[in-house]
Amino acid sequence: MAVAILGGVCVVGFLAVGIVASNNPDIKARSQQKDAITYCDSEYKRLRSDQRMTYGALSIAAAACEKLRNDYRRDWGRDP
């Protein structure tokens, strides 16, 4: 019985933390920035595998991804 009550309390606690986190604008902004970095990195990898891409185009893409990472570090004080 005590284990079931404790389990229920834990579930409710996790749900409450999730609801608060989803309504927090900082958490949303951080998540959006991480998603942008992930997308940028995946697109850069895709471009690198394309034989038609020039060094200049790849450099621009790499610089854009690096800027996103630097902005994240500046805004949140840690690596993405």
Image (cartoon, helix red, strand yellow):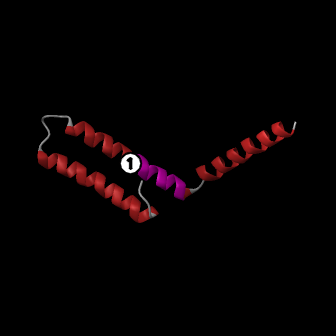
Numbered marks: total: 1
Which sits in the foreground, 69 or 24? 69
Residue sitting at x 60%, y 52%: 21
> Callout 1: few (<14), some (14-19), or many (20+) C-alpha neighbours within 10 Å?
some
Q: Which residues are magenta?
A: 26-35
Question: Element at badge 1?
Answer: helix
Residue 68: % across, % down? 34, 55
User: Which residue is labeled 1 in the image?
Assistant: 36
Given the image, on which type of amino acid does mark 1 rest?
Answer: Ala
Q: Considering the image in quadrants, where does the N terminus appear?
A: top right
Judge whether 49 appears above or below 36 on screen: above
Residue 70: % across, % down? 34, 60
Residue sitting at x 27%, y 53%: 64
In the drawing, does residue 65 fall left or right of residue 19? left
In the drawing, does residue 78 fall left or right of residue 40? right
Which sits in the foreground, 56 or 79? 79
Judge whether 54 appears above or below 23 on screen: above
In the drawing, does residue 71 fall left or right of residue 63? right
Judge whether 2 appears above or below 31 on screen: above
Residue 69: % across, % down? 35, 56
Residue 63: % across, % down? 24, 54
